[in-house]
Image (spheres, coloured by chain):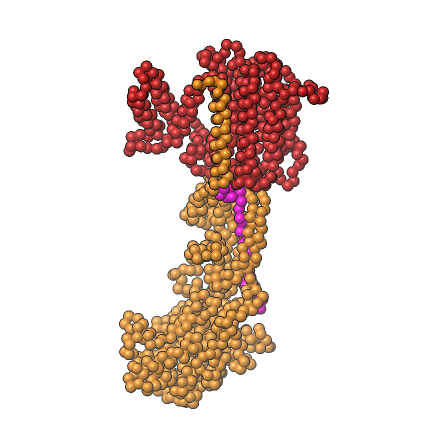
Chain colours: A orange, B red
Amino acid sequence: MDSVQNRKFVILAIFILVGMIYVTRLIYVQIFDEDHKKWALTVSQRSLRILPDRGVVFDRNGKVLVKNENSYDLCITPADFGEEDSAEIGQLLNMSIEELRAILNVTGIERIVPQKAISGLEIEEMESLQHQLIESEAFHFIESSKRVYPGRIAAHVLGFTGIIQPKQLERDTANYYREQDFVGRSGIEQVYEEELRGLIGYRQIIKDNKGQEKQLVEYDTAIAGNNLTLTIDADLQEYGEQLMVNKIGSIVAIQPQTGEILSMVSAPGYDPNLFSGDGLRKNYDSIFNPKDTLQTSKNKAIYNDTYRPGSIFKLVQALIAMQEGVIDSTTGFPCNKIPMNCHNHPHPSNVKIAIQHSCNPYFYNVYRRLLLRGERKSHFLDSRIGLTRWENAVRSFGLGTAFETDIPGVKTGNVPDTTFYDEEFPRNKPYGRNRWAFSMIYSNAIGEGEIGVAPIQMANLAAIIANRGWYRTPHFVKAVGDSLIKDERYIRKNYSAVESKYFEPVISAMESVVVNGTARNAQIDSVRVCGKTGTVENKSFNDHSVFIAFAPREDPEIAIAVYVEYGTWGGTWAAPIASLMMEKYLRQIGSIQGARSEKSLAKEKRAFESVILDKNADIR
Amino acid sequence: MRTSGRLDIFPKRIDNLMLLIYAAFVLLGLLTIYSSAYTADLPSLFSLEKEYGKQVLYIGISIVVGMIILLIDGKFFINYSYHIYGFIILLLIAVLFTPAVKGAHSWFKLGGFSLQPSEFAKFATTLAFAKLLSSPNRKLTDNKTRFYAVSLLMMPAVLITLQPDPGTVLVFVSFLLVMYREGMSGIILLLGLLVAVITVMTIFIRDSVLLWGLLQGPWILVAFACMLFAVSIFVIRKTVRKRQRKTQVVRAIYVLVITVVVSLSTKLVHEHVFSDRHRDRFDVILGLIDDKTGVGYNQAQSMAAIASGGIVGKGYRNATLSNDQFNQVPEQSTDFIFCGWGEEWGLIGSVLFIVLYITMLIRIIMIAERQRSQYTRIFGYCTACILFFHFLINIGMVIGVVPVVGIPLPFFSYGGSSIIGFTILLFIFLRLDSERMDVLR
């Protein structure tokens, strides 16, 4: 049976069988083997993202506030990391051993891909590191760019960029970002992230087995982000920051007709360049330090919304009272220092005199009339109705509500309403429904009590009075790219509950305050300044010095609020600083010509040199 | 049948189909080598600085050598078989004293070129082997003949092992198939298969544990073989007549002993003789390791190249892995040349290649079988089986069914010694075939 002759068939069968097995295997490998197809793409191709230039940010006059500068990123290829002592490298790179390990312990194909370890190195830093790491093949430097803030101003406004947080990466459904990407993390950088970031480009390349680019397959250019023009006036901003050196507080200046924020200072400030590139990682803790009593990281102009408005609130009280008809501009009340104390001043026989001398009993009586209208027999019920009406009117001045605007973290402040006294105040044991009345809450009359405002709201109040009754929401953006912003939120006029005719007596009073009242320090030669000082009481420390103003009286160009914490009297610190700011701006736009007065220069010198950081110092 | 006087010096009855297939492989191989070296600023095809340029030269030499062989009377090869064999054995000894290149003493350096005598050992051994088996009174059932035959194979095999060049050594196994054709018992092939299966299984299950740690690795196989043995004894008792029982039981014992010995010795060899490199290659093939960037790199890269070709391929000179400038596939133009072919021409190309190759093997067997001369027939079988083993190992390696072993693809791969050696082998056979009508030798 097994004739040797027939063995040729066995051998032919073996040949054909192996041929068929290999054909089958090739069908599998070349059609169905996704694992190796994917591997082929992984090792031979790479899609390189080309990061676009982030948009440049200009001030209202075209000065650069934020731009980009070349920098270098250090990348580590884990597969090439061999003999090096990781503790030593960590120290050299200023990285914790955990951070370094996280990079070195990646798995799979990532091991042969350079991993970004440090971003935004200056050329000198790069050269120094390159010199020290020259022994190892694992380290590479690639060019990138970082944000630079040439004026070193407006840190709180502009914000900073930083490596994207895991949570934001999760929310990024459009799949724009990758790990280690830089995004705007606060301020303008955050709010206008989408405008600034641009469109990512791609380079599809073929690489060799060492990962070196060898051939370009496809190219998709990156499109730079839109430039942004802000309403900020860089010179005014810088001046404000200089004036506020060695002080705690804030300045907000607004162009009243447009709601454009000309300047927003929060003191103490810091150099925004601290956080650019790799700086955020290195310097974050030094600024965002919970033990920092000066709260350097906070933008006090919007963040501190628990300041009581103090005497400044008398302006609002007077306006609402006239509108509601409970007084008219000629109504007088005796200054009997009951139930609130007052200083000695002429009889407040009308609204103007009352404001000019900031008479406490006068506004006690005004507030009493506002709250107790005599519509109910019970004081409790009557106060309830009165409070609701008053509260609605107060809110129309932009108080107690957060502006819908491009300032991240803008806060509401507090205007007490019925719910507040029913359920929230006092915090440990709220009054309860119908268990409070005017007699328990009258300190609101003079801006103490439970009213809380942020400096930006006070600046806006100045703008409302300057406009005789309306405001445009304060905002930072003027133009995106080449097109002026046409956002309904910023164009709409928001009318206060008070008609414009009631503003004149108040404005006259404000001018008197500057001319011969508490804010004589705020005078500017040849300009009619209107202002009102405030003193925010602090129980165990010096009071805060507050001043709001606008100028010129007719056709106002600037409205401003200045807070100098622990500065005691509004007229001592806040008023002169506000006047210097206004003068600076008015000179800049050409409203004031000629040389500056001796008085102005002296004020400036005094502001530059004074240090008000001690909460109890005698600084009169 | 004489047509013209011009080609009179060449023998009639040269097998044209074989010449055609040979020409196809050589040409397609050259095109693939050219493609893998292709860049936009390529020097001319004949530049001797590039592999394809040298290959053109080697092909030229091969054609000249082939034509010379066709001019030489077949008697010359038959008569001088042992002399040629002896000369190559001397070369194989001499080459061991050359300086090592990449850890192997395999090359004679001659100027810019190098000669690899093991490539010539194949046809030389074939000559001697055919001569031995075709001698009168030599039968493979006879122990003395078997001894001579195995010795004839072992001599070059051992010398090549000393280089070391395991890939080429493996090719000598192909002579077993020829011996089978020439009358050796088929049992030996089956036993060889059994050994191979057990070896692979032992490695595959080396870390497996059964029965709560009682049985581990090869002992599982041993236990399994014992159980099988017990069952077969039982079956033999029930079914086989008493007189034949003894032979059957002896066979069963053989199988048992081989299983136990191979399994246990595989474990020993695998653990103590194999270097890590070899162990890893087996483990990668068996899927025990998936380490594409480490020990499985070569195979992963070659399979990636082939897989990325898909059905129709990326087109000529469009390979993105099998190209020198990307350097993704190791030994691109020699051992892994099939990657470039598969990547550029896809499944269609690779299936055509395999069909053509198997056609060539079948054709050689058909030619061998039409011989009246035993010498020529044996020579033909040797040629077919050597080419088959190269195919089996080389293609198997690049498509991931055989561990990585350095061995060229005949006629296709870059390399002077390889292409010249195979040309000599094939053309001696074609010359011998052309004399098939002559008197019986």
Specify whether residue A459 is in view. yes
User: Any magenta on residue A47?
Assistant: yes
Of the pair B276 and A264, the residue shown nearer to us:
B276
Residue extending furthest top? Answer: B137
Residue at image position (30%, 75%) is A422
Residue at image position (50%, 28%) is A16
Residue extending furthest right? Answer: B5
Of the pair B39 and B228, the residue shown nearer to us:
B228
Instruction: Tell me which segment is drawn in magenta.
Output: A37-66
The percent position of residue A496, horizontal first and vertical second, equals 45, 79
**In this view, A172 is above or below A85:** below
Left or right: A126 as drawn, with respect to B276: right
**In this view, A310 is above or below B410:** below
Residue at image position (46%, 52%) is A179
**In this view, A32 is above or below B11:** below
User: For the C terminus of chain B, which image quadrant?
Assistant: top right
The percent position of residue A512, horizontal first and vertical second, equals 47, 84
The percent position of residue B143, horizontal first and vertical second, equals 45, 12
Of the pair B180 and B61, the residue shown nearer to us:
B180
Tally of marks: 0
Residue at image position (56%, 27%) is B360
User: For the N terminus of chain B, which image quadrant?
Assistant: top right
The percent position of residue A534, horizontal first and vertical second, equals 42, 77
